[in-house]
Amino acid sequence: MSPMAKSDWRRPARSSRRELLAGAGALAGLAALPASLRAASEPIVVGIIAETATLLGAGIPRGAAMAVDEINAQGGVLGRPIKLVVYDDRVSSSEAIRGFQRLVHQDKAVAVVGTFVSEIALALQPWSARLKIPFITSGAGSNDISAHVHADYERYKYTFHTYFTSYFIAESVSDSARDVLVDGLHMKSCVMMSEDAAWTTPYDAALLEFLPKAGLEIRGHIRFSPDTTDFTPIFNKIEAKKPDVIISGIAHVGVVPTVQWAQQHVPIPIYGVSVQATAPSFWKDTHGSAESANSQTGAGPDSAITPFTRPFTEAYLKRFRLLPVYSGYSTYDTLHLIAEAITRAGSTEADKMVTALEATDHLGTMGRFKFYGRDDRFTHAIEYGPDLVPGVMIQWQNAKLKTIWPLKYATAKVSFPSFVKLPA
């Protein structure tokens, strides 16, 4: 369980530089100490690679900073503080690779956390293998990340995945659709609408498996370019198939389809994944067209998945003056996982950390974290389930994000605008 005392949430906020270089001030007097004492006192460096100019990417160093401040306030790890070093990859795989190399060779990082972009996570994975450094992606979704670990364990065992794989995102969406749409609103049919991206190919394949089991007939499957600016032809094509609901898979273009759906009064509700809709600015970005916009995610602002979810949300809001995005929750939990693994291993040596991470059983903000084992097809991905990390569905209602699933955590019932036609 995450070592979290109530006093942690009342510490004053620090400057952004201190957030990203937690524990750095302890270095000032180390040079005068004997080498053996310096080694015992020097910070443990954890690297962060993220798209820091984006809202979802910025959640990664912010969530990490909150966790590191708590860990250091409680004595650090093995008597040493954790220090974060952050690199902005500028949404570029080549920049991310250069940052990864600097973190290992120059900054002496013992682990690297980062990126919500699957293509970048996949580009970093071979470098984690080559340099034998644990790499934990806390935001990307591609199934291939854990599939590589399963297919070539000895090479890729250093990679872990602390957000949902595309497969489990699809399973979570389908499980919620069964409870909310099929059982709750008597829906029977759908059309899938996903952007063309690395994470949506396995996501769509899994939806084709799970949605019929949830009770939804699939009447169409549309994939569109992330560069699409006019969704009118797509909505017209979907309307012609007369489904009860559109099941979405959108990460990078959420504002445009949401605004056009609302302006055109498309009579079919949209339900599924719209990652941009999880951002606190989405209501403003869509000029209020976000009413009823929803998305599967790790945790929402009012979710109470564990005793730690809401306190973290409140502390994040107080510190950064905005609500956390999903990558803030997952990265905060990830830093605690790393600290606990180093403690169990009694070492920052990579192979010992891998073994310790594989034994993870941690209650965090998103649920109970455990990793799938070597023999599972999703090796080193987090385990999905109602008593593990279940995911939540959140929805914009009256300018606020509400949790609508799982039903035991729901703070509101699903709702759609009056122009949407629901089954009788």
Image (cartoon, rainbow, N blue to C red):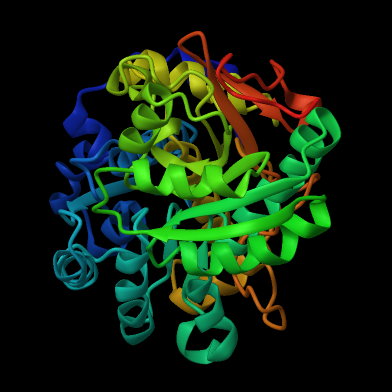
* Quadrant of the image occupied by residue 217: bottom right
Asked whether residue 5 is in view, the answer is: no
Residue extending farthest front: 240
In this rendering, the answer to whether 335 lies above or below 55 is below
Of residue 4 and residue 96, the one placed in the foreground of this image is 96
Q: Which residue lies most toward the right here?
A: 183
At 68% across and 39% down in the image, what residue appears? Answer: 244
Most foreground residue, 44 or 102: 102
Question: Residue drawn at (58%, 32%), measured in percent from left and top?
Answer: 269
Please tell me which residue lies in front, 280 or 389: 280
Q: Nearer the viewer, residue 300 or 104?
A: 300
Looking at the picture, how far across and down is residue 309, in whole percent? 60, 27
- 395 left or right of 225 in image: right
The answer to whether 306 appears left or right of 214 in the picture is left
Picture residue at 14% right of the left edge, 50% below the top? 32
Quadrant of the image containing the N terminus: top right
Question: Can you say whether 391 is above or below 193 in the image?
Answer: above
Query: Height in image: 24 above or below 184?
Result: below
> Residue 296's quadrant in the figure?
top right
Location of the C terminus (image quadrant): top right
Q: x and y percent of residue 131 in the render?
A: 31, 82
The relative height of residue 155 versus residue 403 in the rendered view (above or below) is: below
Displayed quadrant of residue 242: top right
